[in-house]
Amino acid sequence: MDLSYGPEYERFREAVRAFIAGHRHLAPVAGGPRDQRARDWQRLLVQHGYTARSIPVEYGGAGLPPDILKSRIIAEEFASAQVSPGLGGQGISMLVPTLLELGTEAQKREFIPPTLSGEMIWCQGYSEPGAGSDLASLRTSAVLDGDHWVVNGQKIWTSTAHQAHWIFCLVRTEPDAPKHRGISFLLFRMDTPGIEVRPLVDMTLNPNFNEVFFTDVRVPAHQIVGRRGDGWMVANVILRNERNSLADPNISLARLNALAEIMKTETVDGRRLIDDPRYLDRLMRLQARVMAMRFNDLRLLSSQLNPGQDATLARLVVKMQGTELRHEIEALAIDVMGEGGLAYGSHPYLRDGGSWQYAYMYYLGLIIGGGTNQIQKNIIAEQGLGMPREPKAGVA
């Protein structure tokens, strides 16, 4: 069996490698869409078709035909070189594909190009104090008043709300409907009067999450995605994209490669840790899991081109397996660095800007965030494996 990509794709791989070699000095080391260097890099990647490949040109993408193998090669080479593959985040990874599927033509033209370029930063208004894992129980309300919705309520665990320009938000528009009905999906600016953001410091010691309060916030009526009352359907499209984006296997590969480099330089009693069977065994186990996640990603990519292919189970495992994998990669790096792995903040012996310690804490939290992995196991069992639902307490 010949598993090689063939001459055409090998030439494409060489072109990607040449681009990285010639332009990597322009890539951001870190930084999100508020960083001008990151936005310039994003623009360059789109121009060369290395990100937003299949998004139409009129929406700010490269407008190229879908090609699973080329997408795979791009991901492999950027991960291998440990070079930024471009901007991500809730707007690009979650909202853009949802608008491509469900948005109006006007919404696509208004929101997708500035989101892809990093000029429009988004946050997600989903979880509430009384509606976390049971999201459909949300109570934030929106009442139609003329040509505006009037929004009142509260959201919590809202990532990047303190930085966002816009929010995509689930609200209840039909209070008497069953809880999975009567929900609508609105888009509105974060500087709209009546919005208050209160940062929440998490265990990374940064305010990655926020509480958001809405008091008589007026939202133009046309800024609704899908039909009124069909927001739960839109929400599930977003959640599908979210779970796929929370644990990108190619980023995991880049982190694994960086970990291997650390193990080549860190020593104990003059011996490199890459040569220590105990540490090498842990590294190889993680390498096997990264490979499995990347093959699973190929299955998801191929299913997009073959609508008859059922990739339900492959999609459902991504969030659970991927977040746990990232946490274990970061954990091994901390172990490998020894006492230096305990450094944090402004410690003089901090390595790589503290990214390993930060990511270790961040992914511990992400195992809970985006739908807890315990809830994910129920979803996998019921929706992926067809197992019966767990009986409710007190129900015969």
Image (cartoon, rainbow, N blue to C red):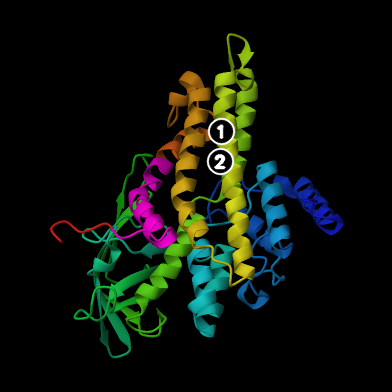
Q: Are marks 2 and 1 in contact (CB under 8 Å)?
A: yes
Q: Amino acid at mark 2?
A: Arg
Q: Quadrant of residue 285?
A: top right
Q: Which residue is mark 2?
A: 289
In the rendered view, tell whether residue 169 sits above or below residue 211.
below
Question: Secondary structure under badge 2?
Answer: helix
Mark linked to residue 285: 1
Structural crowding at the residue carrying mark 1, measured as other residues with C-alpha within 10 Å and reported as few (<14), some (14–19) or many (≥20): few
Magenta-drawn stretch contains 378: yes
Q: Amino acid at mark 1?
A: Arg
Left or right of 289, for residue 232: left
Percent x, y of residue 187: 40, 74
Read off the magenta span. Answer: 362-389
* Residue at the extreme top of the image, as rendered: 269
Q: Residue at x 60, y 65 (%)?
A: 303
Percent x, y of residue 129: 22, 58
